[in-house]
Amino acid sequence: MNTAIVIARNTISEALRKKVLNAFLMVGFAMLVLTFAFQQFAPRQELTLVKGMGLGIISMAALLITVILSINLVPTEIERRTIYTILSKPVRRHEFLLGKYFGAASTIFINVGLMGLAFVLAIVLKQRGADMGSSFNMFKGIWMIYCQMALLSAVAIFFSTFLSPLVNFFLTFSLFIVGNLSSFTLDLAKNTQNVLAKGFFTIVHYIVPNFGNFNYTNPLVQANVQVKSELALLTQNTIYAVVYATVLLIISILVFDRREV
Amino acid sequence: MAAAIEIKNLTKQYPVPMKREVVNAVDNLSVTIGEGEVFGFLGANGAGKTTTIKILLGLIYATQGEAYVLGKPAGDIEAKHKVAYLPESPYFYEHMTAREIVTFYAQLFGMKIEDAKKKADELVDFVGLGGKSDVNKRVAEFSKGMRQRVGIAQSLINDPDLLFYDEPTSGLDAIARRDIRDLMLELKRQGKTMFLSSHQLEDVEMVCGRASIIHKGKLQVIGTMDELLGGERVEVTVVKPSAELTGKLAGMESSEFDGKLTVSVANTDVGGLLDAIRGAKGDVFSVVPKKRRLEDIFVEIVGERIDSATGSLASTGDRPLDGSESKPTANKYKDLMDK
């Protein structure tokens, strides 16, 4: 496990130097700042809009960072042959893969965390310190975005053990979209009469991670949307992400264990 | 002598894209290398050398056969604690300095960060990258020779019993090449087992006690250097040979240039030849022993000459028999290690 941590630390230090990821982070920051430029609405409306857009921008920037980072982690090591010197050391393949995943998850955490901090700080400043509770509540949404991205990273790393980065890019994005429409696929499965279509949509609904679960913007920005038990929902979603990512990583390890590098 | 590496009937097949065929990258290879032995593994590009090493390190898997490293199945983690690998043209994380890279690899052996940093300092100095101008340079700014030195530094972290060096001197300038050759000689002196894959035949002749030649995945020949290079010949050159002498020497392996006749005979026949020349009042210009070269053997076995310019089998050229070129003037690695 110590080896996985060493690899994770190295992955973070390399990822944080990647210009393309930093560019997405900067664009995220820039858009967050632009969000605060809305002046033509009533203060309450304006705040709702700012919060909604802010979480959306963080989510979008995090999505790009996660996908670009995660699809390349393993193939790049193989392509530039750095993996030879690593796996010729007493490093088990699962330690390598877990190190890569933890490195990616930590990098995403740092990026989402930085954007989240900037966002919450900006809201606090905009409200001039009033209603600090609602400002800090934004961290719940930011945490859900992080869980969603950590799960998406596991999906991308799973595909990267046997697919090229280009195919992985499209597949990961597609699954993210389908996973966000999970309730829709369930409805399709229930309402269709065609047995094949019913089977297909049911399988899609249960196999593709339900990324839609993590969209927690409405309860945070709409006063009229209430959640019965916020803590239960957040905990449940966190556990869902951890369990799903664990399963994906186990399958990834099994595939990568037999892969020739 | 216990076996450091044992390869039994090893075969590695790859499917040919778009065809229902397979190609044998390694074909029924069997080799045993003893502990403390420096073994040369020769072959042209694509002969199967790197594939064999990758199987032995567990990076890829054999289609058939068995391979053992330090008594453990290939790829065993326990064995990897005592093994080092220097890949051909090693690549490292470009954003790191040499010291950071060696520290990173040292940590992969379970070293604590402080110990890893200390080891890295030692090794970076050892390979000559500890100078002020290099120590803060990122690998991205390194020349090929400097990268190779980083590769050597990372291969010595665990004081390995067995080293796999894949083309360690390929593409290096004369000085860097001599330095790395010196290091290999020093490792040999220390009794390390070395599996040296190369097409730089001169290096192999100098460093290895035993060698094999592999071609298209098949083992062609294996033996000690004495066995492989045995059967020395001698070239005797006669100035302006008389017609009588030319007649006497007809039928022998000879060539004539600029009024000089050069005759090549086996070492054992040189006395008889000189007697014959003296008997015909011939004027001997020179008697030059000619040692067989690995390149000659390679060409004999494989039946094809490979151009060094293409990066394949390198020509070793002529070399004086006294071996002056083979003796480095000063082995700095020996001095450093003795310190």
Image (cartoon, rainbow, N blue to C red):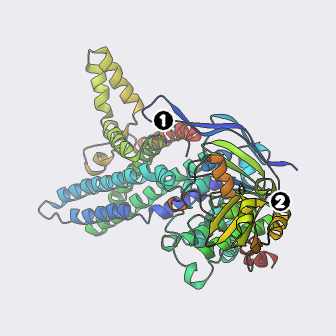
Left or right: residue B266 compared with residue B106: right
Pinpoint the chain carrying mark 2: B
Element under disc 2: helix
- Is any atom of residue B41 visible in this view? yes
Is A78 or A104 nearer to us in this picture?
Answer: A78
Q: Which residue position holds label 2?
A: B269
Crowd band around label 1 with a 10 angstrom C-alpha radius: few (<14), some (14–19), many (20+): few
Q: Where residue A225 is drawn, which disc sits there?
A: none
Is B197 or A117 nearer to us in this picture?
Answer: B197
Is B142 or A225 nearer to us in this picture?
Answer: B142
Residue at 40% of width from left, 47% of height from top? A165
Residue A48 in the image, given as x and y percentages of width and height: 22, 55
Give residue B188's quadrant in the image. bottom right
Residue B21 in the image, given as x and y percentages of width and height: 50, 30
Residue B175 in the image, given as x and y percentages of width and height: 62, 76
Crowd band around label 2 with a 10 angstrom C-alpha radius: few (<14), some (14–19), many (20+): few
Q: Which residue position holds label 1?
A: B16
Pinpoint the chain carrying mark 1: B
- Is any atom of residue B102 visible in this view? no
Residue A65 in the image, given as x and y percentages of width and height: 37, 55
Residue at 65% of width from left, 63% of height from top? B255
How many angstroms separate mark 2 from mark 1 (CA)? 52 Å
Left or right: residue B207 compared with residue B101: right
Task: State how many labels appear.
Answer: 2
Give, as a three-letter code, the residue at label 2.
Asp
